[in-house]
Image: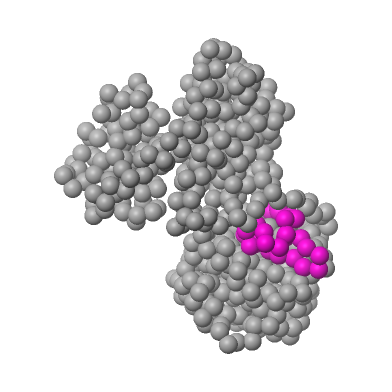
Amino acid sequence: MCGIVGYTGYRQAYGIVIDGLQKLEYRGYDSAGVALHKGEQIDVYKKTGKVANLEEFVYGKDLQSTTGIGHTRWATHGEPSDRNAHPHYSNSGRIAMIHNGIIENYASLKSELINKGYTFKSDTDTEVLVNFIEEIQLQNECSLEEAIRIALKRVVGAYVILVLEAGHPDRIIASRKGSPLVIGICKNEHFLGSDASPMLAYTKEVVYINDYELAIITPEELILKNLGTERITPYVQQLDLELSAIEKGGFDHFMLKEIFEQPQTIFDSMRGRLDLQSHQITLSGIEKFANEISNTNRIVIVACGTSWHAGLIAEYVIEELCRINVEVEYASEFRYRNPVIHPGDVILAISQSGETADTLVALENAKKQGAIILGVVNVVGSSIARLSDAGAYTHAGPEIGVASTKAFTAQLTVLNLIALKIASLRGSISEERYQKLAQELNEVPEKVEWILDTQVDKIKTIAKKYKDARDFLFLGRGYNLPVALEGALKFKEISYILAEGYPAADMKHRTIAFVDENFPVVSTATQDALQDKTV
């Protein structure tokens, strides 16, 4: 995932941009760069590796500037290298751009530009886009704003762009489609970021930019327009996020911190929603569509990665408790099919960030066909949250670790609340069972805390025992199968050791051929009706 930062105001931009890039390091990257506006010229510095490499590279250089943009890159077009790192210049050097996303038709645009005499120093789609914008500006003798507007109407793919132009030292032009962009509002200064973390030390007032919106940002003003030049009134939101929430808090790394935050995040996901005294579940975000959701004949869950695994568990829960047909779709596949969607179908989108591009496109397509969109997301004001007809936030707080932990368990908590709420409205379970399940859900934070308090030493012992294993197999049945899949995913993400998740019944078919005394098998076998069949 790329990280984007920008600043224009009265302070020195370099320090703010570098600090912002460091706050986005959790997203993963292979190179970093900055562009600083010097009035009639734009200075670009970029380097493969960590932000620290970039800082060392620019040491001693003239970094005086009050407007700048910065980028951390995860390679999509072109290998990780200095020349492929962002920002990128146009051929003339008048325009500099950073970009997050993928321009799918960049090859055809590049061919057009080569035929017109343009040359390229990198292998990136970003350099193609910045030159495409410059070519439009030159041919049409128009402003940069207008050139960007024309260019983006021809671009196929996802993007967030931040653009500087020589001769306009106090201005950043930005736009987005399918990737997140946040603008922080202050008196006589503005901050930009892929998320809010780079600006939290300066402001809590932010504007989330929507798809197909163009922002012209100066220290004094934020002008927001659509791609048809109509002005839009920015919707300013007040963040309740604290900077301390995205710091390590004494833990060695963010993922460990977030694992130990799970008892609190699970509790927060239920706070104000689950009342054991009145035996009521209150989900204000779905009340308006409660009848439509509870009376639907079909729920399609759309998600990616860890959220997809949460969706698989929700499938079991909703079908068992609510007796509604549930399908779980991988968003990146669902968006490229022509799925059968009927008016009244409920599309349940699960996303930690609320910005997952494939999930967003799938929802937009389903909404056009009359489906009700129900969102379960973590980030308030995110694109999926705004697109949804109804939904519930997970209240997990910022998740900095790339491998999702607390967001996953918070999603499961909210999905169970939704299932219980629908089951209650439909009358598909008895009051006795409803109360029993609500009580057991209420006890989950305490049980998770007990595990974290008492089992860490055992976990360390197991890890040491199997640290030299080259492959792992995770098995599960029923509710435990998605847990096995999620366990295998986490194992691969963190250890870089091959791990696969399979249904336990498949152990005797195919899979067993790979297993020997040096091949650890992890069985997720909780105390349920299928435990004997698993063990």
What's drawn in magenta, residue-wise? 184-211
Q: Which x, y percent locates residue 496?
A: 34, 56
Residue in view at x 35 percent, y 54 percent: 495
As drawn, 242 above or below 130: above
Q: Looking at the image, is 206 positioned above or below residue 116?
A: above
How far across and how far down the image is residue 230, in percent? 83, 57
**Name of the residue lying farthest toward the left:** 517
Depth order, front residue of 248/337:
248
The answer to which of 483 and 117 lies nearer the viewer is: 483
Q: Which residue is drawn at 48% across and 33% down?
A: 446
Say if 535 sits above or below 151 in the image: above
Residue 199: x and y in percent read 67, 62
Callout count? 0
Residue 226: image x %, image y %? 77, 57
Residue at left 41%, top 29%? 479
Q: In this view, does 395 lie to the left or right of 327?
A: right
Q: Is residue 447 visible?
A: yes
Q: What is the basis of the colouring in this image?
A: one colour
Is residue 150 visible to us here?
no
Residue 405 among magenta residues? no
> Which residue does the image show at 28% across and 43% down from the upper left?
473
Residue 196, magenta (yes or no): yes
Front residue of 200 and 97:
200
| In the displayed structure image, the side of residue 105 where residue 520 appears, left or right | left
